[in-house]
Image (spheres, rainbow, N blue to C red):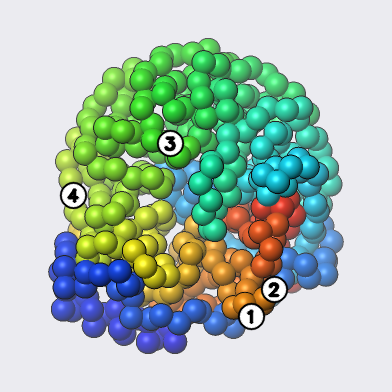
Amino acid sequence: MAATRRKLLQTIAGTASVVGLAGLAGCSSSCPDSDPPTPEETISILADTRGPFETTPSGVWNGFAGDVGNTGYAGRSLPDGDLVVRWRIDLALPDTDAGSLSASAPTVGEGLVLVADERRVHAHSLRSGDRRWATDEVSPTTDDAIAEYRSNTVAPVFGPAGTVLVGATDGLVALDPSDGSVRWRIGNMTRVSRPAVLDGTIIALGTERLVAIAPDGTEQWRRPANRLSAPVPPAAGDDRIVYPSGDGVVARDVERGSQTWVRDRQTETQLVVDDGTAVLGNDEGLHAIELDTGDPLWTFSRGEFRALLSPVVTPENIYAVEQPGEAGAATFALDRTDREPTPRWCSYVGSGAVTAATDDLALTTMSLGSGPDRAQSIVAFTAELGASPWAIEGGSHPRAWVTPPAIVAGAIVVTTRGGTVVAIGGAD
């Protein structure tokens, strides 16, 4: 099926312009492959555990999208050999309808796995899963909108000077990673999204304000933000912070907070900053903007009424999910090695999206199966051809829906909305 995916995409690419595919307009997907993927191997998050990692996996992954640029790119290898469950634990989530489904995507680093729920942050050992601490109530930000492929609670991030940063409903909270105690707070903000950290400066984006903070909690500057309702995180790179607002996409100088440009482009999913370029998706397609000047570089469209959202960017590829008006979504893999992107392959992903990628694989959070056997899963696609070598299977109940994974050297960490945390490594 993978070769078919690639061949059909090349056929379309040969007859349609990259900058517009008006002939494909409509409410159905433009991806010619409407069949769900069939992974060669599947491992359940409920599989028997093998025990702790022999050595603690290295690397840092800061929640959904993973880094300060929101690229979703893991420049490190996945586990070697067959995948096995190393350990599995269940968090004590709040006993409310919303709270019981509020576990965030995992953040991994410094030997810890961090997961937020609507009230607190939990820390466990990356090597063994043993509990380290849980905070008192800090009220991490949650999103009222539900998307199957991501959690609705903002994940914590590792900050400078040995801190853990939490975007909260009433500001930004800095925790001590050794015991979860509060070091400092920045208030007078609402529904802060996942913060960005660039060259030691912390950037917190709330509904109405954008604030720059020093590692010791000293506020450096504060600017109006007019962020859209969703707690979309800012993206940073090359001394620029970029974020979506009611006025469009806004870029500011990190050092002084001065506005460098604004472009009339709306998006409700994460912006990506990589290699001097800002990439965003919306109802009109996928757009690239020069980070320094704000000048448009290119637009990739699959036709009218087909949004391209949630980009994940690697050195060679861009993955984006096409969401037509009345059909299942499709992930498109685009080759970015030339000046403008060209299609590699596409695949049906239902209500899912690619949420992380390495050089060789794109990891998609989506459902597999149908009816009572339908299970929210993490499905791997090969970057070159779109083949599906393996999947990590969650479950059909919302409590068992997996969130976007964290990838560090030799390990994948997965949470479910209901608070199950699973560490997966290689059998070798």
**Three-letter amino acid code of the residue under disc 4:** Leu
Q: Earlier in the sequence, mark 1 or mark 4?
A: 1
Q: Position of residue 183 (x, y in %)?
A: 68, 19
**Three-letter amino acid code of the residue under disc 2:** Ile
Q: Residue at x 83, y 66 (%)?
A: 50
**Three-letter amino acid code of the residue under disc 1:** Glu
Who is closer to the viewer here, 339 or 323? 323
Look at discs 3 and 4 and give the one toward the viewer: 3
- Residue bearing the label numbered 2: 43
- Residue 41's tag is 1
Label 2 sits on a secondary structure element that is strand
Distance CA(mark 1)–CA(mark 4): 40 Å
**Three-letter amino acid code of the residue under disc 3:** Ser
Quarter of the image with the C terminus is bottom right
- Residue bearing the label numbered 4: 297
Q: Is residue 76 visible?
A: no
Residues at badges 2 and 4 in contact (C-beta under 8 Å)? no
Q: Residue at x 25, y 70 (%)?
A: 26
Who is closer to the viewer here, 292 or 19? 19
- Residue bearing the label numbered 3: 229
- Residue 80's tag is none
